Structures are given as structure tokens and as C-alpha cells.
Amino acid sequence: MTEQGTYVPRSVRIPSPQSRAPSPEGERSLPQSPNPQSPIPDPLPPDNRFLPKHHVRSGLDFRRAYARGCKASDHRIIVVGCENGLEYCRLGLSVSRRVGKAIVRNRWKRLIRETFRLIQRRLPQGIDLIVIPRLGVEPDLVGLIESLPRLAGRVREKLGKRGIGD
């Protein structure tokens, strides 16, 4: 029994308020990247979230990107991009069953979304990016962090040459 008279099993340990000392950095501190040469950026402020407005979800937007967009690719992913008329970049995912079973497809989607979340400030604004993973390639966060901004920049250049975008 607790002081309030409610039952708590013995296996549940309730810490007392005195046993918890605040950390010197404050209540919450963000972990720092252990390797300064790592391509994974340090954690960003909490406003760097992957919000619903950053998703390309409608079939119309996907069709527009495939019809009017430009492509850039490397050995990991293919990026199709087209202007969106907005002040921010949006991400769409197209992960086919040919990539693998559900576990592999979901891992690709998680890693691409995390890559976008981490580097969205480095991506060109005002375009929709549709990312398609290549067949037979293992998903890798560090590789995606290297590929996505480079390919998005190439797409922006191609759109600029066609007179679309900037």
C-alpha cells in the first residue's frame, strides 16, 4: 500500500522525489555526436520535425511529379522532383514490393523519413521529392544522408535549366 492507500505490487518500484537529482545541463539534454567527422548531423532543435505538411500523399501530386518532374539517381536511390509552389520541401515515398518483404520496405521508409527529417534544412525549398530505393541495395542511414541532398540539388539544377522552380 502507498501513502494514498492504493495497492502497488512489490515488483513495481516507485522512486521518491528526493532520489532524483537534476542533471547539470537541466532537465533534458540532447546527445552529442561522438564523432565530429560523422556525416550524421548533431541533433537539431525540436522544430525540425517531419510534419504532415512535409508529406506528399495525394495521387495527384505523385502523378504531377512523375509527369513534369526531373530525375536524379545514384546506386542507392532515385529522386524525382517537381515544383510544388510552397515555401518548403515535401517528401513522397515509393517503395515497391520488388524491393523486398514488408520488413525491408518499412525499414527503407523509416530511414528515408529520418534522413529527410535530419537534413530538411539543407534541401532545396519549393519542390516535392519522390524517393524510390534501388533494388538489391541494403538501407543505410549514413549513405542516405550523403545521397539525398546531393540528388535533390541535382534535381533543383535540372528544374532551373527547364525554367521551373527558382
Image (spheres, rainbow, N blue to C red):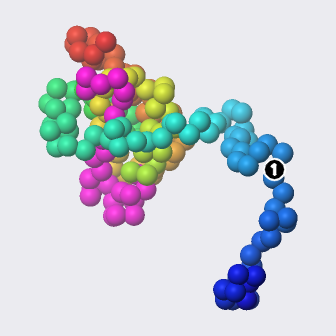
Image point (31%, 45%), residue name? 93
> Quarter-wise, where is residue 15 in the image?
bottom right
Residue at (46%, 48%) from the top-left corner?
A: 111
- Left or right: 53, with 48 as reference point: left
Query: For residue 137: magenta?
Result: no
Which stretch appears magenta? 84-108
Q: Position of residue 104 (x, y in %)?
A: 39, 59
Q: Which residue is rendered at x = 35% and y = 43% of the image?
A: 52
Quadrant into which the N terminus falls: bottom right
Location of the C terminus (image quadrant)? top left
Q: Secondary structure at mark 1?
A: loop
- As drawn, 60 above or below 18: above
Q: Position of residue 161 (x, y in %)?
A: 26, 11
Given the current orientation, which residue lies at the most extreme front position?
A: 4
Q: Left of 96 or right of it: where is 116?
A: right
Task: Report how many numbered discs are placed on residues in the image.
Answer: 1
Q: Nearer the viewer, residue 107 or 18?
A: 18
Which amino acid type is marked by label 1?
Answer: Ser
Q: Position of residue 39 (x, y in %)?
A: 60, 34
Name the quadrant containing residue 90.
Answer: top left
Task: Determine which residue is flagged by label 1.
Answer: 23
54 vs 70: above or below: below
How far from the left and from the top, in percent, is residue 40?
Answer: 60, 38
Q: Is residue 86 magenta?
A: yes
State which quadrant residue 92 falls in. top left
